[in-house]
Structures are given as C-alpha cells and as structure tokens.
Image (spheres, rainbow, N blue to C red):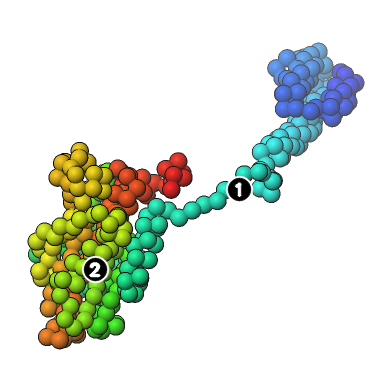
Amino acid sequence: MKEKLQEIKKRALEDILELKTLDELEKFRIKFLGKKGELTLVLRDMGKLSKEERPVVGQIANDIRQEIEKKLLEIKTELINKAKREKIEEEKIDITIDTDEIMVGHRHPLLKTIDELEDLFISMGFTVVEGPEIETVKNNFDALNSPENHPSRDLSDTFYLNDELLLRTHTSPVQIRAMKEMGAPLKIISAGRTFRFDDVDDTHSPMFHQLEGLVIGENISMANLIHTLDIFIKELFGKDMETRYRPHHFPFTEPSAEVDVSCIKCRGEGCEECSFTGWSMELLGCGMVHPKVLENCGIDSEKYTGFAFGMGIDRITMVKYGIDDIRLLFENDMRFLKQF
Ligand code: DAH
C-alpha cells in the first residue's frame, strides 16, 4: 500500500507540471483528491491493514495530500495571475497610435456670442471688466437699491452661502464694484455666469449668463441709452431690426425700460414664432442709473448721470442660432456642439 501511495505521489507531481489551464487543474484535483479520486480510493482499503500500520499509512497519505494541495495552490495562483496579465495586455490601448483623424475643436456657441458682444461694445469704446460669481449681499442687492422685501432676495429665489454671501443673481453688482474702484466717468461692460433658484426646463436653468453695461458721465441721458442700444441691436441682428422701449421697473434704474426687438424670424412681419406680434419680447432691461445707486458708490449724483443695461446671453444665443432648448447649451452633447 505504501508503494501504491508513493506511485500515486510520483505520478501526481509529474502530471501537475503539465497543467496549463484552471480547467485542467480542476480535473486533476478531482482525479487524485476527489471523493472517488485515486488517493481516496487507496485509503478506503485501510481496513485491511494491521492496527500498527494504519496510523503510519494514514500519516503518509495525509502528507501526500498536503503536498499535492500545496503544489496545486501555487499553480492555481500562477495561472490566475497569468490570465490577468494576458487580459491587461489584450485590453491595452496604445495612445500613441497614429490615426488619420485630426479632431479640431472650436468655441462653444455661448462663448462665441460673448466674444461677439464684447467685440461690438469694445468698438463703441467700452472697457471689459470682470466680477466674481460669489458676491456680497450688499453689492448684489443693497447697494443696487433693492429693498429688503424684494422677491428676488427670497431664500427660494437665491443661492445664499451665508448671511453675507451669495451666488450673484445678476451681473448688476459689477456696476457697484466698477463705480467704487474706478469712479466717474465710466464706460464698462461685464459678462459672466449668474445663478437663480430656477427649476430646469427648456427656457430656464439655475445657472445662466448675462452681460451688463454701464455708462457714467456728465450729461448722459436716455437719448444716449437708446442710441447705444439701437446701434448694438442693428450690429448684432441686422440693420433692418427695430427696437421698442417699454416702461418697466428695476430698483437700480429710474426710469427703467424693457427692450423688445423685431422678431428675428419674420423681421417684424408677424409669424407663428412671435405669435404674430412682429416682436421678440424682453431681450434686455435698461434704465437711467438711480441717483441713490450713484451715491452708494461715492459718485456725485448732481454732477454725474448714467445709464445701465443687462441682457441674457443664453437667450441671445438661442435666438441667434435658432436653439429651442436652453439645456442643449449646458449638456455638452458633441452631436449638438459639432454644428457650430
Ligand atoms: N439685472 C437685471 C436682471 O437681472 C437686468 C438689468 C435691468 C440690468 C436693468 C441693468 C438694468 O443694468 O439697467 O433682470
């Protein structure tokens, strides 16, 4: 029996070296160590041995089993590692590989609009300034003469960071910064992100973009405001575009107006797009800077007057390119962006 065991051991340790796959390994295990495996079958005959011989043979059989198991584990680990290495090698991406395709990117339609708007105003003598997206409540509301109970100050309308800081709800606070830093006279524009607690739909997004303009000087009047904005609209949309100034209210301007422009599609004829009115509504807000706002910034309101305006850049981009859903501007879907 001892010889039989030694013979099994010799054969097993030879066969083990031939194992190439986990499948073969499992078959081998069953063949030698399984319930009906060779080693097990030999031990079944232990009853035939003498009392003295039994533990000796048992010990030998156990040692052999352990030796085979140990060897099997080593080989199993090696096979698993080998499979892993092969998989990694197989899935490797060669990032240096040459392809014929050269991908050239381009400006996002929103940034294109901002560039175009800035160029237009620069050509009219405006300077471009920047303001922070995190603003003080003072600059965003108080200094702009927005009363404590104004709905735009509501928690459900505005992203507050704490009692004093918020994500700016419009670009108008840049006016305050510019007046305080540079004083009068002044002729600036500022474009950037603005934030309001709006639910997302095809025309609303909690993050959107505005462009703000401010002119302060001696003898600045509503006529200057209308002339500047008329030129701007004609340059942007075409010479045949008309403007319409509707009285409105903004806390920081007096008087205030909202500006409509001819429907971009029918150029004023009347079509489905403009509900047959001939007008695209509310393209921008504007007005004469409120004397209180000038005084809040240390500018003599007896000597200086000024006008200001603010517009939604997303809206202008949508009108310009015929985009009917604001979400398309922020989702960065390449199929959409490739068109511009
Ligand atoms: N800040 C206004 C808004 O977000 C837009 C605006 C209106 C800006 C009139 C102005 C202005 O500078 O004079 O709705």
- The answer to whether marks 2 and 1 mark residues whose Cβ atoms lie closer than 8 Å is no
Please name the residue shown 75% across and 23% down the image. 24
Q: In the rendering, which numbered label is found on residue 102?
A: 1
Please name the residue shown 13% across and 63% down the image. 257
Bin the neighbour count of mark 2 within 10 Å (Cα to Cα): few under 14, some 14-19, many 20 and up. Answer: few
Give left or right: position of 70 versus 213.
right
Whether residue 255 is visible here, answered yes or no, is yes
Q: In the image, what residue type sits under mark 2?
A: Thr
**On the image, which quarter does residue 218 sit in?**
bottom left
Give left or right: position of 172 versus 222.
right
Mark 1 vs ligand 1: CB below 8 Å: no
In the rendered image, residue 116, in percent from the top left (x then y), is placed at: 37, 61
Residue under pointer 2: 228
Give left or right: position of 182 versus 119.
left
Instruction: Label 1: state its secondary structure.
Output: loop
In depth, the one of 319 and 25 nearer the eye is 319
Please name the residue shown 31% across and 58% down the image. 236
